[in-house]
Image (spheres, rainbow, N blue to C red):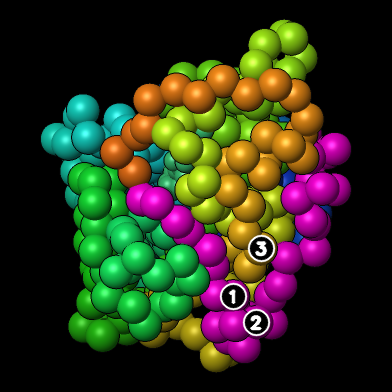
Amino acid sequence: MKYLVTGGAGFIGSHLVDALIVKGHQVIVIDNLSTGKKSNLNPRAKFYKKDIHNYKSIKPFFAGMDGVFHLAAMPSVQLSIVHPLESHDINANGVLNVLMAAKEAGARRLVFSSSCAVYGDSDGKILKKENMKAAPKSPYALHKYIGEEYAKLFSDLYGVETVNLRYFNVYGPRMAESGPYSGVIKIFLKQKADGKPFTITGDGKQIRDYVFVEDVARANILAMRSKKAGKGEIINIGSGKNYSVNQLADLIGGPKKYIAPRAEMRHALADISKAKSLLGWQPMISLEKGLKLI
Ligand code: UD2
């Protein structure tokens, strides 16, 4: 099969590209290299440096594609709060451009990378289920929600099959080392290597659900071919296990330093029963094992 991966030079996208190529598929990557890196790119993928906010410039690359995986994004809650216009351009308008290009090219299915940020605080409920009301607390969350709604609309109106995957905290090799796109696991591992204490935001009791990047790549491939999905379904992709930031720090092992809290959702734990039933997916790498693979 021929697949186009937007954001295929990025952290998650590049693992997906690797998995597709191992399975013998032909892969085209478009990526503007804003957060992605050429060094992440599988040499057997065809790469084009293109920006998803320019519809005309990306459209030609969709011709002849069997499916599209849309991962290109400005993937930072905190950055979207400071730069809502840029976030809207990439995380909302960009999805529309990619959906439109997929539709025009006659691609069968598009799998969209969304985020558990869409849930917001869910009235204090820790366990997030897909039928809960969306309650975005940041431009990033709102834009991902708009993307999901567009994907569903394109299925209803134009018959493009779509699946929305709501990722929880994805970690693994090639995670950004530092800056706004880095995750707490990478930050703590670096702090430990540098002999520094772990910087814990707020009281550290906030809960997260950490899912290994190769499990996420596999979920994408299953979502592309599942016969039980394709009409804009929303599907959580997490581990189904919860860790507070304090517990994560204890697992990695080292001294803690408490810093100011962030404006962020308090708790996020995925109910993954829908991923099991619709995709036949479940995570295979535990956090304890995954930490050793970074
Ligand atoms: C994750 C995703 C983000 C979005 C969001 C949805 C990552 C890197 N980011 O954001 O793209 O999908 O989920 O809600 O996966 N923390 C510390 N110390 C630090 C850095 C972070 O305690 O030095 C805390 C942070 O306040 C948060 C937790 O660790 O409570 C996880 O932080 P993160 O930046 O890894 O990811 P998150 O959940 O903010």
Q: Amino acid at mark 1?
A: Ile
In the image, residue 288 sits, relative to residue 275, either above or below, namely above
Q: Is residue 77 visible?
A: yes
Rendering coords of residue 263 (x, y %): 29, 38
Left or right side of 71 for 286: right
Q: Secondary structure at mark 3?
A: loop
Rendering coords of residue 117 (x, y %): 37, 55
Rendering coords of residue 23 (x, y %): 78, 61
**From this viewpoint, which residue is outermost toward the left?**
85
- Marks 1/2 in contact by CB < 8 Å: the verdict is yes
Residue 219, quarter of the rendered image: bottom right
The answer to whether residue 288 is magenta is: yes
Q: Is residue 63 visible?
A: no
* Residue in front for this viewpoint, 151 or 105: 151
**Badge 2 is on which residue?**
276
Q: Amino acid at mark 3?
A: Lys
At x 64% / y 73%, what residue is drawn?
222
At x 55% / y 75%, what residue is drawn?
271
Labelled disc at residue 241: 3
Q: Which residues are magenta?
A: 265-294
**Badge 1 is on which residue?**
272
Labelled disc at residue 139: none
In front: mark 3 or mark 2? 3
